[in-house]
Structure formats: C-alpha cells, structure tokens
C-alpha cells in the first residue's frame, strides 16, 4: 500500500504525519503532494522529506475552498497507475497514523475489497466523537467484509465518498474516475458508481484534534477568530500500545471505533471532548465565514 499525503502550509503537522507513517508503516511507500505552500517552515519540511520520500510540489489555480486538493489527488492517481500501484491511502497533512499497520490490517483491507466488488472507498480513520447524540443506525457491521458499512440516507454527503480514504486505483480506473472540484461533486460521482463507504473495524488513522484549518489558501477573519476561541494548536496523538490495540481489535462490533474512546494526545495535553472543525458550534462565525468566502468568490469573477 502507498500513502499519498496532501499538504499546504502546516509544517509541524506535515512532519508529524509523514513521521507517523514511516514509523508505523515502514513497509509502505509515501508520496507528499504539496499545493505550493507559501510559508518557509513548510518548505523546509518538504526539503527534508524529499531526502527519504517522494515529494511533488504543484500549484493549482482553483476557486474551490479546498484549493488544489482535487487536482493533486488526480495527479497522484495518474502517477500511481503509471507506477503500477493499486491499493493506496489518501491522507491529509493534519492526520496521524496512531498504531502499527500490520499484515492483519493489509488482510482486512484486501478482505473488504474482495467481499464488496461494488465498493470504491474504505475509511481507515477513527469515528469522530461529538457531544450531540449519535445515530446508532449510522454504521452497521458486515461480517463478510469485516468492516462497517455506512447507511444510505437522503442526504448523500459522506455516504459514498470521502477525501481521506483507501481505494484501489484499478477499481477507479475501471469506472473512468477523475477527481472533480469539490467534495459534493465527487460524492455524486461516487454514488453513481459505488456503494456506501466502508470503515475499517480497527482504524489506524485520525485527524489531530483541535487543529487549525483552511477554507481556501487564505483564512477568513471568522476562521481565525474561531481558532482562537477553540485554542487550536498542535496536539499529536500518543502512539497506541499493546493493551490499547488489543482493546480496539477485541471489542464487540456494537462499539464503534470512536477516537475519544481509544486515543489520547501525548502527555494528555488535550483531554476530550475534541473538535475537528474550529467553526463547529459557532453558528455566527460560520455564517460570517461563509459570507467572507462569498465575497472572495464574487470579487474573483
């Protein structure tokens, strides 16, 4: 399996992400696709990573809020196919591999795609715990594939597609897949070709909690205020050890793999509950953020 890490202007997050892959999945290859980062710290990290890993720095003129992510994902797919890659994992720079990736995990990935020929993507990340009530029917365990399958709903967001996922390039190629601009567009494309997303029974990847975010290459004033209110920062995870891994693998399938239940930050620097979006729960800032983004798009026309 090969990891493709997509990055922009988050130096210490990127270094932590790639280091976690190299440490926990030493047999896997790593390629970093950077969207032309502008800060010197990230450029220094990219230069250092290039000594041991493939690093591709690409600029992309995009008006979408996520910048050039999808152009980079498409470029990674094309490069992977040209190199004979098949099973790949798309990762973002603010994530971390939190435990060793073993032959058992590779077998679980192979089992999922073999048992579900209509599957397009498999999620390797833990579930996000949230204060609000969870829907118990949102995920169901499928013993044939050894994974959770996301329930179909009227609202398709996050049902058939996610930016962070494991996929098989040969399966994407068979459906003439090309990454489109925006998660909703890719969701619609995935819904036309593939069944609902799967989630690994024992995930090995997670976003760092309470991290800074980007909505485009320039943060809005609203997002900066939200990050201050949330005390956003760099909170890497402690790597899971034997007992924790055993508890994750040996639990009842009715217990969902929620990050707050199985993970902790280094030195317990950030106790749960955690947030993964600085704007979550701050409705007035979210509205202001959306207005600022609308103004930007309008001025670009």
Image (cartoon, helix red, strand yellow):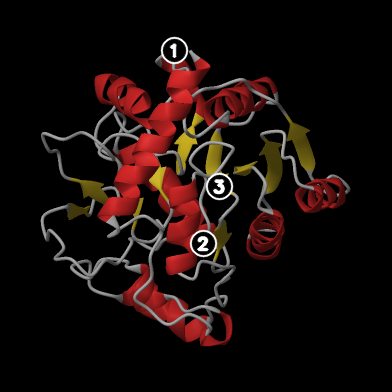
Q: Earlier in the sequence, mark 2 or mark 1?
A: 1
The answer to whether residue 59 is above or below residue 234 is above
Q: Position of residue 13 (x, y in %)?
A: 64, 58
Secondary element under disc 3, as helix, strand or loop, is: strand
The quadrant of the rendering that contains the N terminus is: top right
Say which quarter of the image contains residue 26: bottom right
Say which quarter of the image contains residue 23: bottom right
The answer to whether residue 142 is left or right of residue 218 is left
Q: Earlier in the sequence, mark 3 or mark 1?
A: 3
The answer to whether residue 294 is above or below residue 274 is above
Q: Which is in the foreground here, disc 3 or disc 1?
A: 3
Tags 3 and 1 touching, CB below 8 Å: no
Say which quarter of the image contains residue 176: top left
Q: How many marks?
A: 3
Disc 2 to disc 1, C-alpha distance: 35 Å
Q: Which residue is mark 3?
A: 92
On residue 211, which mark appears?
2
Q: Which residue is mark 1?
A: 176
Does the rendering let one see residue 75? yes
Disc 3 to disc 1, C-alpha distance: 24 Å
Which residue is depicted at the point 76% across and 46% down? 39
**Dot 3, crowdedness within 10 Å: few (<14), some or many (≥20)?**
many
Q: Position of residue 66 (x, y in %)?
A: 50, 34
Which residue is depicted at the point 38% across and 70% down? 274
Tags 2 and 3 touching, CB below 8 Å: no
Secondary element under disc 1, as helix, strand or loop, is: loop
């Amino acid at each position: 399996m090969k990891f493709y890490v997509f990055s922009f202007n988050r130096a210490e997050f990127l270094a932590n992400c790639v280091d976690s892959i190299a440490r926990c999945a030493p047999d896997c290859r790593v390629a970093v696709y950077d969207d032309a980062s502008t800060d010197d710290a990230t450029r220094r990290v990219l230069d250092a990573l290039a000594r041991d890993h493939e690093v591709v720095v690409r600029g992309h003129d995009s008006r979408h809020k996520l910048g050039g992510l999808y152009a980079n994902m498409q470029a990674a797919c094309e490069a992977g196919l040209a190199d004979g890659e098949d099973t790949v994992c798309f990762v973002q720079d603010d994530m971390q591999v939190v435990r060793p990736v073993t032959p058992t995990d590779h077998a679980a990935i192979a089992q999922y795609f073999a048992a579900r020929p209509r599957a397009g993507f498999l999620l390797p990340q833990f579930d996000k715990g949230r204060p609000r009530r969870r829907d118990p029917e949102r995920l169901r365990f499928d013993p044939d594939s050894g994974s959770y399958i996301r329930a179909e709903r009227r609202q398709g967001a996050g049902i058939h597609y996610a930016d962070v996922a494991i996929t098989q390039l040969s399966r994407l190629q068979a459906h003439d897949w090309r990454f489109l601009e925006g998660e909703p567009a890719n969701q619609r494309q995935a819904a036309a070709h593939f069944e609902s997303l799967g989630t690994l029974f024992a995930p090995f990847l997670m976003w760092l909690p309470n991290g800074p975010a980007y909505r485009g290459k320039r943060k809005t004033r609203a997002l900066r205020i939200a990050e201050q209110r949330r005390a956003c920062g760099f909170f890497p995870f402690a790597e899971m050890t034997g007992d924790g891994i055993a508890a994750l693998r040996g639990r009842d399938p009715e217990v969902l793999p929620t990050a707050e239940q199985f993970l902790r930050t280094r030195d317990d620097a950030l106790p749960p509950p955690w947030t993964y979006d600085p704007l979550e729960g701050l409705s007035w800032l979210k509205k202001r953020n959306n207005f600022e983004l609308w103004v930007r798009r309008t001025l670009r026309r």
